[in-house]
Image: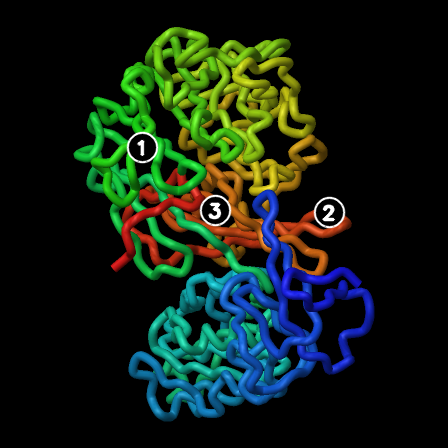
Amino acid sequence: MPSSSSGVPRFRLVFRLSLGLGLGGVVAACAGIHTVEPVVGAAGGAAGSVGVGGGPATGTGGTARGGLLLGGGGASGRGQGVTCSPCTDFPAAPIFDSGAPDNSQALLGPSGGSGASAPGSTAPCLLEPEDGSLFPRNWLRPRFRFAPAGNQDLFELRLHVDNQANDLVVYTTATSWTMPKDLWKSLSIDATDRDIAVTVRGVARAAAGAGGGASSAASATIRIAPASADGTIVYWTTSGGSALKGFHVGDESVTTVLTPSNASGQCVACHSSTPDGAFIGFSASPIVSGNSSHIEIRSGQNPAQQPSFLSASAQTLLARVQQQLPTFSRGHWTSGDHVLVVAESDTPGVPARTHLDWIDLEASSTAQGVGWGELARTGDPGAGPAHPFFSHDGQSLVYASSSGMINGGIVDHGDLYRIPFADRKGGAASPIPGASTTQWNEFYPALSSDDGLLAFTRTPDGQTSYDNAAAEIFVVRAAGGTPTRLRANDPVACLGRTSPGLTNSWPKWAPTAGSVLGKTYHWLIFSSKRLDQSHPQLFMAAVVEDEFGFSTTPALYLWNQPAGENNHTPAWDVFQIPAVE
């Protein structure tokens, strides 16, 4: 057997896991994917470990990030590399919340156990989480939100997991309930990769007192992934002025990161993280429309700070107007090779010729070919390339080829193309099969952390990429293929709204993916107007990849964001931003 760096022999999970072995684990990171590989002989493991089978109840180690727990184990199972069976995370007694009366159970009647319900009036609408939702293990604790049917003013929320000794039962007069932090922490260990059955019933108390019955149950099945989601999310809000706000995964509120007062202009918008997370590259404009924008690079923790290696020549080049959508690559982020790529338009405010330019951030001169240059796009028929995305390995760029780009990157006839970076020269442009059609306007490309998958937004060809209700999000292999429509485009049916028509747009991948037992968990954030046609909000979904292909999940709403603000164009990376208070 091969050995780990600690001298402990390894094995791959290709035989039965019923040996009762206590297993720990190690995490290997490569190309943006964390792979968990079990290790024999330890009762517990380091952060990110895998605990399989039995093992002492007092085994040491943790499972804080990217970990997985399978099978039985000792009594507590908390960070021990073992699990409980049966588990007692759910209390035996019901929880009475928001003034629910002591006789709630009598008013609602028997549930039938395991989430079943007696027939009755119309069930509440279970708005979140949606059926089929997948939670990263370290995600926001779940919020259960539902809309009453008729005069319902008392609700029973029930969660059932097959390894729990009890169902979780909550009686509430409110239309939402958020799981307590301690309960979520233990459940995210003990219920990993198990079905969690959710049901909600409602009753009008006045009718119940007059002999009326409880409703039938709204139901959903959700799961907790055996992988975490890493990084920081920074997004653009246009409520009360332009600003960038952000939060770390798991934070329950947001913080302001950048405002126009920290930049040169009235608007800060399209943005991305430098590969080390230390700085944010963004478009800054002297007017609110975003026209005549230039590029700035500033610290997310101290906006007055710029990179120490940023030369005077580079600052002059970044200050040129009509530059948009900066993108970086970890393949070109070392001393002597700090490069960004932007889309630059020749004429403001009208469909115009655009070019993709590289800028050397350590440039000793502003001369073309020294401090900056245009990337060749040989064979690309479009005059207006937009929305460049630098591959993480630094070998290529994906972008939207169009007949002309308007300020801010607006295109009407986009097709996704790829060019080599080729030491700042560019080269032959290749259309990406499945994302370069005449039927659709394809734009906003984003490569997954391993550069293997490509997410993008599309509308019918000829329709604008800007704030278009018809926009939907698709995923395709980076090399091309048949695009897969995200399930997350569609909200829960009882909301009464359908896509297209919800402005699903601007997908961005998490900076890493977790690979566990043959499956890779990619996380994707995007914006949508499904809740309120006036206010875009942020949602997250999973793309789960295995040897047979990949599947997608419904959307999870990020309830930590201000619901009354316009929150869009998110970026998910390793931004270093202030701690959220």
Q: Secondary structure at mark 2?
A: strand
Q: How is the image coloured?
A: rainbow
Q: Which residue is mark 1?
A: 307
Earlier residue among tags 1 and 2: 1
Q: Which residue is mark 2?
A: 549
Task: Please tell me which residue lies in front, 180 or 102.
Answer: 180
Kindly report which numbered mark, 3 or 1, lies closer to the viewer in this rendering. Answer: 1
Earlier residue among tags 2 and 3: 3
- Which x, y percent locates residue 396? 59, 25
- Which x, y percent locates residue 104? 40, 88
Tell me which amino acid carries mark 1: Pro
Outermost residue on the front side: it is 7
- Which x, y percent locates residue 418? 61, 23
Characterize the local packing of mark 3: few (<14), some (14-19) or many (20 or more) Cα atoms within 10 angstroms. Answer: many
Q: Secondary structure at mark 3?
A: strand
Quadrant including the N terminus? bottom right
Residue 130, visible in the rendered structure: yes
Tell me which amino acid carries mark 2: Gly
> Would residue 117 appear left or right of 170 to someone viewing this image?
right
Task: Please tell me which residue lies in front, 345 or 29.
Answer: 29
The numbered dot on residue 525 is 3
The residue at 28%/27% (across/down) is 284
Tell me which amino acid carries mark 3: Ile
Task: Please tell me which residue lies in front, 287 or 124.
Answer: 287
CB within 8 Å, label 3 to label 1: no
Characterize the local packing of mark 2: few (<14), some (14-19) or many (20 or more) Cα atoms within 10 angstroms. Answer: few
Mark 1 to mark 2: distance in Å? 41 Å
